[in-house]
């Protein structure tokens, strides 16, 4: 039973919408995880880590990487270790801080990520293919309003 099945007609419409969004997110994420595993023998956390590094070609410290991924450094250290072994990323020591490392994609890692990102994009596009372009734009705009309201509500004392 998915999250949406928990809602009843007597629940507020907003709650039913929230559960539908969560269900859709989980279903799409499941498809992405499956595609990454089947086509690239990798996981979503590995893809996410490579994605963060691809956006920052100069690399970043582990603390920044873990902050962006919203996990602890301890959670990404094993992933990082494996990606270094595979030659997809590299650790560079920082002369001004011997305890910190700069993590960045290697050329091999960048090429590999580019292939995965192209497929990832296709899976996401496919997930929304039943919607027209206008419907996608409308949904994006509506969710943008919800996002802005939620951000401003969270920032208010």
Image (tube, helix red, strand yellow):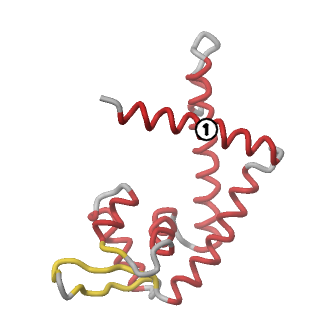
Above or below for 134 versus 81: above
Q: Closest to the observer: 80 or 150? A: 150
Residue occupying the point 45% across, 82% down: 105
Mark 1, Cα crowd under 10 Å, few <14 / some 14-19 / many 20+, is few
Quarter of the figure with residue 122: bottom right
Residue occupying the point 67% across, 43% down: 140
- Image spot of residue 54 (x, y percent): 50, 75
Residue occupying the point 50% across, 71% down: 55
> Where, quadrant-wise, is the C terminus in this rendering?
top left
Quarter of the figure with residue 80: bottom left
- How many numbered marks appear? 1
- Image spot of residue 65 (x, y percent): 36, 67
Left or right of 23: which side holds 65? left
> Where, quadrant-wise, is the N terminus in this rendering?
top right
Left or right of 47: which side holds 80? left
Residue occupying the point 62% across, 32% down: 20
Above or below for 33 versus 5: below
- Image spot of residue 28 (x, y percent): 64, 50
Left or right of 62: which side holds 122? right
Left or right of 60: which side holds 39? right
Q: Which residue is mark 1?
A: 143
Mark 1 element type: helix
- Image spot of residue 25 (x, y percent): 59, 44
Above or below for 109 versus 47: below
């Amino acid at each position: 039973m998915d999250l949406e099945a928990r809602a009843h007609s007597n629940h507020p419409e907003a709650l039913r919408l929230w559960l539908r969004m969560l269900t859709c997110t989980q279903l799409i994420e499941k498809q992405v995880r499956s595609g990454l595993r089947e086509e690239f023998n990798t996981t979503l956390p590995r893809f996410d880590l490579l994605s963060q590094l691809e956006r920052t070609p100069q690399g970043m410290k582990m603390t920044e990487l873990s902050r962006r991924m919203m996990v602890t450094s301890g959670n990404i250290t094993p992933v990082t270790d494996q990606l270094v072994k595979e030659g997809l990323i590299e650790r560079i020591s920082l002369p001004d801080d011997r305890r910190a490392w700069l993590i960045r994609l290697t050329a091999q890692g960048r090429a590999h990520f580019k292939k995965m990102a192209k497929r990832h994009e296709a899976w996401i596009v496919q997930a929304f293919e039943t919607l027209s372009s206008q419907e996608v734009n409308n949904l994006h705009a509506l969710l943008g309003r919800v996002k802005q309201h939620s951000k401003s509500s969270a920032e208010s004392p």
